[in-house]
Image (cartoon, grey):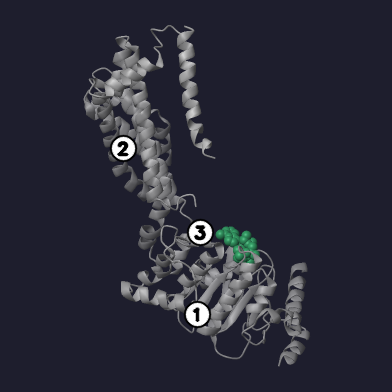
Amino acid sequence: MNRDKLLPFVGVVGLILVWYVGYWTRIVDPVLLPPPHTAAAALWKGMLGGNLYHDFIRTVARTLIAIAMAAAIAIPLGILLGASEKLYRSVEFVIEFFRSTPASAMFPLFLVIFGVGDKTKIYVAAFGAALVILFNVAYGVMNARKTRILAAKVMGASRWVIMRDVILWESMPQTFVGLRNGVSLALVIVVVAEMFIGSVDGLGHRVFEAQQLFEMPDMYAAIFAAGALGYGLNVALLRLEKSFVHWSGK
Amino acid sequence: MVATTLQLLETAPPASPSPGPGGGRPHITIRGLCKQFQGVTIYDKFDLDVPRGKFVSVFGPNGCGKSTLINMIAGLIPSDAGEILFDGKTLAQTKIGYVFQNYREALFPWLSAFANIEYPLKLMGVGKAERREKVQALVDHMGVKIDLVRYPYEMSGGQQQLVSIMRALVVDPEVLFLDEPFSALDYEMNLFMREQLQRIFVETGTTMVLVSHDLEEAVYLADHVLLLSRRPARIADYPLIPLARPRNDQTMSDPDFVALKGHCLEIFQREVRR
Ligand SMILES: Nc1ncnc2c1ncn2[C@@H]1O[C@H](COP(=O)(O)OP(=O)(O)OP(=O)(O)O)[C@@H](O)[C@H]1O
Ligand SMILES: [Mg+2]
């Protein structure tokens, strides 16, 4: 049915309607809840040559740098850990502990070490994302299908060749799960970090500043920009995953 | 000849059956094989001969150690003690092929069917052009009509298992092991794959060892049926199946076939009840 394609828009239209109703009936103070078209106009203006665009780009850059750093460190390390069960068992608790620690709690510590610049925001985000990626890669390597490893072994593959030709590939779907979760987490951390003292740009900064100045349409615009960014990054990674790990889930 | 064999079968099997069916020189000789899993003895001083160029089907109760046996012979799991030789050579000096029951988990889904088949040649360091040639020759020989550019997950179960059989055969193995290769396929596909395997066997003369839980399939394909007892596994019987090849649908209703199958079933049931 062609109509089914329109289904995802039902929720969007519904949300906008509820928003308008809330605005018209004055259930919420109109100063706090401007009408959707005002927020949309602020988003449009902000992204086309306004400050919002600049902040958007800053946040994207920080998130991407953080995830690249995290991946560069965590993927090789995860493979190493996953390949040796003993090694993994010995650091499992530490990884699990810090993976469960809210990365935002590490922020003040990183601030003291790296100062108020960009570095701190990026490093905290990279730290959080790296643990998520590390865990997933190691998990993927450890859970490589036994039969496939045996199949390679019986064909005469050495341990190293099995690692390169089988286990690495086997772990790839799980690596992508880690990357996707890592990107989401990195974005959260970056945006929160941008709200801290000393920040001069970024979506977090924009949301915080708009709120402080009581420029509500700008605040909503920044929130939606952040949402679009998170959604976009996730979709982009899913696309990449689909073309790269074509066999995943089949 | 069949009649005499049947007469032989009707006499009670010797107290301690010999490890081999006799006649011809053995290809695989197993002596004093021992294996325990967590204190449970699966094999204890087990002896077996697999004759050269013959098809041996392994049949026995669930969990008696059929897979364990061929996995130890193929070097997939270590044995606790004992000696396994291929024509006097060790496993390392022998080219073998192995076909798993779970083709889905045995093929490499990130490689096309073609790349899967040529993979063992790549491991052996065979050049690209020669690999291509060898795979093509095998495909032509088997008369397979599968688009090998496709990925395994785009194929039917039977096609995937054919690909895994070709992957095992492409190196011209001396012995081919198959662990319940067709049990995940429906009956029609099962019959088709039996024919394919029989044809490959007749044409290549490769020694084959098949584990099966389908007695009809086991007897149909075999030159010898290795009937194992409950664990610790012993040879309950090792009868010759002297039916002419190629066997076909009529074979299955042939009185000799039916009698041989009946005999195997009887031994099996005796062992299960014991
Ligand atoms: N890795 C293992 N660890 C512990 N026990 C095992 C292991 N592998 C097999 N076993 C046990 O050894 C026995 C023989 O196993 P095996 O898989 O060889 O049986 P099988 O004859 O192939 O059975 P099936 O008909 O179910 O395929 C079984 O009781 C099984 O539970
Ligand atoms: Mg088995």
Query: With respect to residue B90, does A204 lie above or below?
Result: above
- Image disc number at residue B105: 3
Q: Secondary structure at mark 2?
A: helix
Q: Which mark is residue A67?
A: 2
Frontmost residue, A195 versus B264 = A195
Secondary structure type for disc 3: helix
Disc number lying in front (1 or 2): 2
Expressed as whole percent of the image width and height from the top left, the position of residue A118 reads 23, 27
Image check: B266 left or right of B234?
Answer: right
Q: Position of residue A242 (x, y in %)?
A: 41, 47
A7 in relation to B84, above or below: above
| Residue B21 locus on image (x, y percent) | 63, 85
Q: Residues within 10 Å of mark 2 (few under 14, many from 20)?
A: many
Q: Is B191 on the left or on the right of B154, as rendered? A: right
Q: Amino acid at mark 3?
A: Glu
Query: Type of residue at label 2?
Result: Ile
